[in-house]
């Protein structure tokens, strides 16, 4: 009969089972595996590797991605799985980072290197302004009335930070005039933004 316990170290949860079948994979060890160069917080290492782009932020994608994987006694990573995800593309990006990670220091039990099962959350959080912006975009999408945004003659699909001092003009084009100039995507109108010369916006 196995004994189950729980351990949280450096943001990593390892739920113990003395031995799992005949594979000798341990969930509780004396020393947890460590990724050399990543410090004590592997989630921060993942954050540096994953491009949490504007595409996610516009769609309001945030939350905790839970993944599990095994670090073998040889320091290899195997059986990487997403236990709970928030978005397929972001989930796969996190999974890819761990799958491709190298140079692990194996876990130890009784001073012996062992195969260790790891489980950890990776949190992605929007700022309040990003969350509010995402809700506004979603409401436009749901109503089917999202306009097309154009900045300095370029279509904008991401988030652009434009300081007020850099703003020269904003105008709205509607109807057939908008479609004739910008295509079918402009059927709900176009918001045309022009910035001042010499002070480019921050993308």
Image: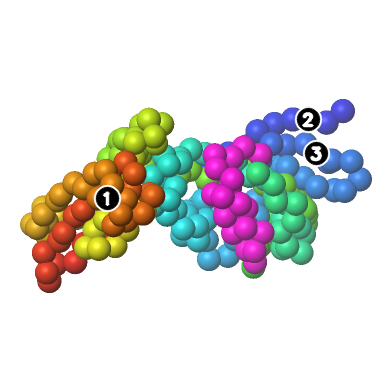
Cβ atoms under marks 1 and 2 closer than 8 Å: no
- Seen from the viewer's position, the closer of residues 191 and 127 is 191
Counting from the top left corner in percent of width and height, residue 188 is at 32, 41
- Relative to residue 37, is residue 94 depicted above or below? above
Q: Residue at x 72, y 63 (%)?
A: 75
Q: Residues within 10 Å of mark 3 (few under 14, many from 20)?
A: some
Residue 201 seen in render? yes
Mark 1 or 2: the one toward you: 1
- Relative to residue 37, is residue 108 depicted above or below? above
Q: Residues within 10 Å of mark 2 (few under 14, many from 20)?
A: few
Cβ atoms under marks 3 and 2 closer than 8 Å: yes
Number of disc labels:
3
Q: Residue at x 83, y 31 (%)?
A: 2
Q: Closer to the N terminus: mark 3 or mark 2?
A: 2
What residue sits right under mark 1 in the picture? Answer: 178
Residue 13 inside the magenta-drawn segment: no
Residue 84 inside the magenta-drawn segment: yes
Q: Residues within 10 Å of mark 1 (few under 14, many from 20)?
A: many
What residue sits right under mark 3 in the picture? Answer: 18
Q: Quadrant of the C terminus?
A: bottom left
Occupied quadrant, residue 4: top right
What residue sits right under mark 2 in the picture? Answer: 3
The segment highlighted magenta reads: 83-102
Q: Is residue 50 left or right of residue 132?
A: right
């Amino acid at each position: 009969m196995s004994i189950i316990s729980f351990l949280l170290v450096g943001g990593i949860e390892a739920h113990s089972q003395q031995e799992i079948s005949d594979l000798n994979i341990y969930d509780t060890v004396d020393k947890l595996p460590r990724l050399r160069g990543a410090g004590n917080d592997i989630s921060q290492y993942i954050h540096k590797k994953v491009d949490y782009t504007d595409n996610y932020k516009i769609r309001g994608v945030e939350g905790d991605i839970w993944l599990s994987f095994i670090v073998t006694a040889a320091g290899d990573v195997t059986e990487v799985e997403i236990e709970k995800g928030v978005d397929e593309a972001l989930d796969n990006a996190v999974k890819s980072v761990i799958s491709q990670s190298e140079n692990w220091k194996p876990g130890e039990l009784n001073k012996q290197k062992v195969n260790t099962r790891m489980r950890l959350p990776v949190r992605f959080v929007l700022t309040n302004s990003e969350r509010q912006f995402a809700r506004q975009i979603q409401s436009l999408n749901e109503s089917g009335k999202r306009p097309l945004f154009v900045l300095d003659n370029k279509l904008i699909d991401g988030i652009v930070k434009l300081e007020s001092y850099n703003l020269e003009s904003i105008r709205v084009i509607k109807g057939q005039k908008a479609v004739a100039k910008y295509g079918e995507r402009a059927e709900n109108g176009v918001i045309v933004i022009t910035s001042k010369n010499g002070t480019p916006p921050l993308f």
